[in-house]
Structure formats: structure tokens, C-alpha cells
Amino acid sequence: MSTETRDTVFIGKKPLMAYVTSTLIQLANLPTVNIKARGMSIGRAVDVAQIIARKTENAGYAIGDIKIDSESLESQDGRVRNVSTIEIQIKRN
Amino acid sequence: MSTETRDTVFIGKKPLMAYVTSTLIQLANLPTVNIKARGMSIGRAVDVAQIIARKTENAGYAIGDIKIDSESLESQDGRVRNVSTIEIQIKRN
């Protein structure tokens, strides 16, 4: 794993707590971090943000701006499909 | 189906376009409508909001405030689980 600091955590197929940990490590060095996901992972991005907000309530980090959007992706059969995306900002209180 | 106007559309297991239609009908009578979902349906709520925003771009409706939260639910085995929720406001431009 790279030790580089990035301001964005992309949600994929790993266990939820892996993304919670990544986000908290980035937040140790940066004032805000964005959690991004698309399609089927959108619900998991909300889970990660909620776990962080709940567990650090007093410490603490809070949920900032939330943006939703959509991206055009070409699928394997060559057709273009729209996929929804979400971006949730986590910031220091 | 009831013809009552409500300011909230809950996203469940119906085809996406059913929720797009319900939301647009409510928006004919109300200045804002909230699209709500929890757990696995959160991604579908974002899809519904994006379809409405994209198809009515000029007409037009826009995405307003987005809130995420979590609810405690008792599952069938009696354990309490947290489930994430989303609420997306759709408003007239």
C-alpha cells in the first residue's frame, strides 16, 4: 500500500472497515477527504461515511457536502450506459 | 394507488421508472419532493434523482439538499443493526 496522501477514497469491493481505516488515515494529514463511489457501491459509500461520523462523534469528524452525478460508461457490448455516482465530503468539526 | 399528494417518495423494489413517474406527478403539485431510501436501495434513489435531473434539464427540476443518516433496525434474530439512509430533495429550478 502506498503511503502517499490523497484527498479521495474510492469505494470498491473490499470489506467496509478497510475504507473506514483508509479514510481515517488520510484525515490525520488532511482537513477534508472525499469518499467516492459509483453504481452498486453507492450504498457502501454512505455506510463508510456513517460509520466514521458515528464513531468519531465527539472526536470528531462530520459529514460535509454531498454531491450526486452520473457518468457515461461504455459497456462490453459497446453500448453507452449512464451510471450514478456519489461524492461525500468528510471534514474536521 | 392513492391520488393524495405527498412530499416524499420511498424507493423500493419496483422498476426505476415507476419512482421517476411518482416523483414527477408530485412535483406537478408541490415545489419540492424528497426521495428517500435505505440500505440496498440507496443507489437506486440516486439513479431516480439523476434521471429526473437529466431529463428535465431545461424544463426543469434540479437536485437540492442531500442528507445521509442511519437508522437502528431490529432484525429477525432480535439483534439491532444500523442501516444507512439517504434523502435527496428535488426542487423546481
Image (spheres, coloured by chain):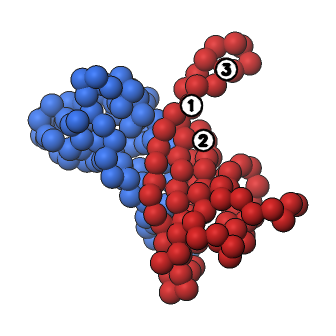
Chain colours: A red, B blue
Mark nearer the N terminus (1 vs 2): 2
**Res A71 visible:** yes
Find numbered disc 2 in the image and state the secondary structure of the residue it sits on: strand
Please give the chain letter of the residue carrying mark 2: A
Residue B35 location, quadrant: top left
Q: What residue do we see at 57% from left, 66% from top?
A: A32
Task: Calculate the distance from the C-alpha at mark 2 to the C-alpha at mark 3.
Answer: 14 Å
Instruction: Give the left or right position of residue B56, taking residue A24 as reference.
Output: left
Task: Name the residue that disc number 2 marks.
Answer: A38
**Res A54 visible:** no
Q: What residue do we see at 75% from left, 63% from top?
A: A5
Find numbered disc 1 in the image and state the secondary structure of the residue it sits on: strand
Find numbered disc 3 in the image and state the secondary structure of the residue it sits on: strand
- Amino acid marked by disc 1: Glu
Q: What residue do we see at 67% from left, 52% from top?
A: A11
Q: Is residue A27 above or below residue B65?
A: below
Please give the chain letter of the residue carrying mark 1: A
Residue B50 location, quadrant: top left
Instruction: Give the left or right position of residue A20, taking residue A84 as reference.
Output: right
Residue A33 location, quadrant: bottom right
